[in-house]
Image (cartoon, helix red, strand yellow):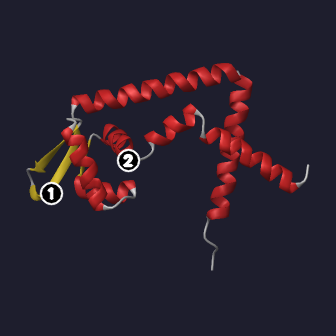
Amino acid sequence: METNQLIDALSAIFGGISRSRLFWDMQQNMRGERFLLSYLYEVGSCAQGALAPMLHVSAARITKMIASLESKQLVVREDDPTDKRRVTVRLTEDGADAVRTVQSQATAHASQLFESLGEQDTLEFLRIVNKILSIEEKVDEPAAD
């Protein structure tokens, strides 16, 4: 197969993957409010000022996301008792429940997919994706002076 044909085949595969339910769910969990909720679920609580650089969004965007999540009673903002200038954000129990529900749904969907693929194809898929990511890391590394 010629390089152009391989590129076309790869583009078609990635197009199909980008439309798949599993990819869509995973992508939604890696950005915006869901990502913020997942991050807080992992770390417990975090200074509001540290969230923007951590999540690679603007401080204004973090403020809007937190206000939205607060209105849904998924997070709370609290003054830091040791530093009155600092505000800490943490999940409420409803926020933790929401994260667990999303994680459970994603796990169930991925499990169905991997069951359909079978163990050998699943392991081969993961091996190849990891190899691609490793190659991409090397390509994206800045050149040494």
Given residues 42 and 109, the one toward you in this image is: 109
Give the secondary structure at mark 1.
strand
Q: Quick check: 8 above or below 16?
A: below
Which quarter of the rendering shows the C terminus?
A: bottom right
Given residues 28 and 91, the one toward you in this image is: 28
Q: What mark, if any, has residue 47 been given in the picture?
A: none
Horizontal and vertical percent position of residue 17: 64, 39
Mark 2–mark 1 distance (CA, rounded to whole Å):
22 Å
State left or right for residue 6 relative to residue 120. Answer: right
Q: Which amino acid does label 1 sit on?
A: Arg
Horizontal and vertical percent position of residue 78: 13, 46
Q: Which residue lies furthest to the bottom in this view?
A: 145
Q: Which quadrant of the figure has residue 110? A: top right
Tell how many labels. Answer: 2
Mark 1 closeness class: few <14, some 14–19, many ≥20 residues within 10 Å: few
Nearer to us of marks 2 and 1 is 2
Horizontal and vertical percent position of residue 125: 70, 35
Q: Which amino acid does label 2 sit on?
A: Gly
Mark 2 closeness class: few <14, some 14–19, many ≥20 residues within 10 Å: some
Q: What mark, if any, has residue 86 been given in the picture?
A: 1
Q: Residue at x 56, y 32 (%)?
A: 22
Q: Which residue is drawn at 16% across and 53% down?
A: 87
Q: Residue at x 28, y 49 (%)?
A: 65
Q: Which quadrant of the figure has residue 36? A: top left
Residue matched to label 2: 32
Horizontal and vertical percent position of residue 92: 21, 33
Give the secondary structure at mark 2.
helix
State left or right for residue 118 relative to residue 81. Answer: right
Q: Which residue is drawn at 31% across and 42% down?
A: 40
Of the image marks 2 and 1, the number of the one nearer the N terminus: 2
Given residues 89 and 27, the one toward you in this image is: 27
Q: Quick check: 26 above or below 109?
A: below
